[in-house]
Image (cartoon, rainbow, N blue to C red):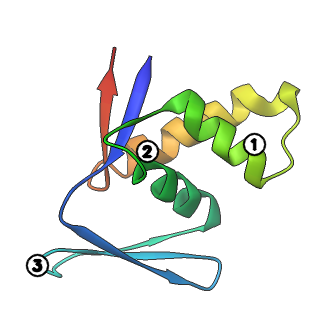
Amino acid sequence: MMYIKAKKGLFSKKVNNGLVILSQDEDKIFILNETASKIWDLSCLNSKVSLDDILSGLEKEYTIKKSDLKTYERECMSIVKKNSELFDIFEN
């Protein structure tokens, strides 16, 4: 099982259709789209959240067909892996 957690020392602010994240020393700025913002929000809720829980959260937020869940799972992992400065990944 894979778990995701938002990295510490980052601050976020909601903007139109997304989120802006600043590093603690304000030397980096990240701009997330609506889907990546939802993943960020879900990853901030607990010490770590499972990929299944993130997909469940996205499924509640958006109309996702069960047949499309594998595609969303791949996209979710792609977002998390491409933004390794924002997320920690834990595997069990």
Q: Which residue is mark 3?
A: 25
**C-alpha span from label 1 to label 3:** 34 Å
Q: Nearer the viewer, residue 89 or 79?
A: 89
Q: Nearer the viewer, residue 29 or 14?
A: 14
Identify the element where label 1 is drawn: helix
Q: Residue visible at 53% across and 63% down? A: 37
Pinpoint residue 83: horizontal percent, then vertical percent: 37, 52
Question: What's the residue type where badge 1 is placed?
Answer: Glu
Q: CA distance from mark 3 to mark 2?
A: 22 Å
Residue that appears at 54% across and 58% down: 36
Say which label, 1 or 3, has the lower sequence index. Answer: 3
Instruction: Mark 2 vs mark 1: give the one in front.
Output: 1
Q: Residue at x 33, y 20 (%)?
A: 91
The image quadrant of residue 54 is top right
Q: Amino acid at mark 3?
A: Asp
Q: Where does residue 32 sit, x and y in percent of width and height?
A: 50, 68
- Against 47, is 36 above or below? below
* Mark 2 burial class by Cα count in 10 Å: few <14, some 14-19, many 20+: many
Mark found first going from the N terminus, 2 or 1: 1
Disc 2 to disc 1, C-alpha distance: 17 Å
Residue to which mark 2 is pinned: 80
Q: Considering the numbered disc 3 on the image, is that residue within a helix, a strand or a loop?
A: loop
Q: Which residue is mark 1?
A: 59
